[in-house]
Image (cartoon, rainbow, N blue to C red):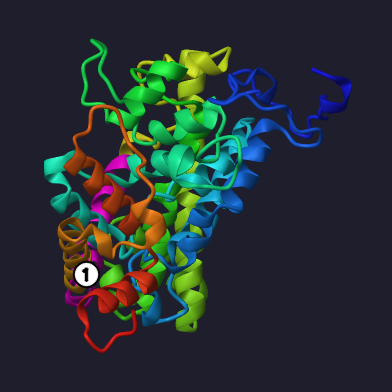
Amino acid sequence: MPESQNWTLKQQFAPYAVDFRNSRGRQFPEPEARERTPFQRDRDRILHSGAFRRLEYKTQVFVYHEGDYYRTRLTHSLEVAQIARSISRSLGLNEDLAEALALAHDLGHTPFGHAGEDALDAVMQPYGGFDHNVQTVRVLTLLEQRYASFDGLNPTWETLEGIIKHNGPLVGASGAGDVPPIIAELDGKLHLQLGGYASAEAQVAAISDDIAYHTHDIDDALHANLFGIETLLQAPLAGEIVAKVRDTYGDLSNSKLVQEIVRRLIGIMIEDLLTESRKRLAVHKPRAADDIRQAPVPIISFSPEMEERNKALKSFLFQNMYRHYKVNRMASKARRVVTDMFELLMKEPNCLPAQWQRTGNDQPGEIEESKQARLVADYIAGMTDRYAMIEHARLFDLNAKT
């Protein structure tokens, strides 16, 4: 490495951390930056991407017009990044890689959150379905159009691997597995080791996602009056914290009480994660980043007890928040908006904006109808909630301006 590119390490990496100096490079080779590591460049490209900016108006649980307090995909991603950096520093991991993965993990989300994704997946079933994690890969490698030399953001091997394995290995020990075409194509070029786990940094980013949405969804639900503090007392894990906060402080304003509950809940989850992860590191004794990838179990993990409590908390949130009738009503509208637009644009592709009529984003082996369906899915998935509602009106309301 040239002397001008020999960056000073500000953090002491553990031996099992991903070292930027050993990066496996990018799909399209580029000269290294003089003042930034490869993973810092990945992070910066993600931050400056159009897909990242649009997360500001994409639903986490509440649609943007329901209030400016509630979290969006953008604020959620920032919170995940903060948690991931803190955990990574404690474990001696590469904070820049963990941050890049945390910021990128939701780039492929549709408008209207999981309701929009469910609707798009349903209409895409004849054409391979739709998954927001796979869509994030499409954004990173195809859909962002910012650079003259390549499509996408040309992320490093390590960032791409972490996104692809966000939910763990894609194939079993035998190599069998249903791998989406775009990932199979990338694996053929980059050898992404789809049968193994991702790096420790990627595992941190994935579990930070769980910590952020569980805890902050409680905050949003209480603010929206979907349930109250007395109901939360019955919730696994969170209920114990409510009782302790009340015992310690007595009567608190609702705002302070909620924030104290959320803060403590995040702290308890992170403390458990660090304790369990250090136990697994001591057992498996990884001496390099690839030892983490080849381990038989995830190294970054909650304890079995915390896993069970988290599952119970998620079940509580499904019953009291995600399936609340107010959320269901908006989700029902969202599914109709997405389904209506997809069906119309498949029948009348000349209604697509001109630039989308000219963009193929082809994948090997797709028949013409499948290409059109994937193109329409890319178009809809990239919309914000606001744009999706405006575009739906343009397509279906005779009084709307086109």
**For residue 218, which quarter of the picture?**
bottom left
Query: Residue 311 in magenta?
Result: yes
- What residue is at 30 percent from the left and 65 percent from the top? 112
The magenta region covers 306-330
Left or right of residue 94: residue 129: left
> Looking at the image, which residue sits at the far bottom?
399
Residue ID for mark 1: 337
**Residue 30, image x, y percentages:** 66, 27
Helix, strand or loop at disc 1? helix
**For residue 330, which quarter of the picture?**
bottom left
- What residue is at 81 percent from the left and 36 percent from the top? 35
Work out whether 378 lies above or below 193: below
- What residue is at 65 percent from the left and 46 percent from the top? 44
Please state, as top left, top right, bottom left or bottom right, where the C terminus lies in the image. bottom left
**Residue 188, image x, y percentages:** 38, 17
User: How many residues crowd around disc 1 within 10 Å: few (fewer than 14), some, or many (20 or more)?
Assistant: many
**Residue 182, image x, y percentages:** 34, 31
* Closest to the observer, 248 or 164: 164
* Closest to the observer, 249 or 100: 100
Work out whether 14 lies above or below 220: above
Judge whether residue 89 can be spotted in this image: no
Count of numbered badges drawn on the protein: 1
Amino acid on which disc 1 is placed: Val
Judge whether residue 4 can be spotted in this image: yes
Query: Residue 63 in magenta?
Result: no
- What residue is at 14 percent from the left and 53 percent from the top? 123
* Closest to the observer, 202 or 274: 202
Left or right of residue 398: residue 277: right
**Residue 391, image x, y percentages:** 31, 72
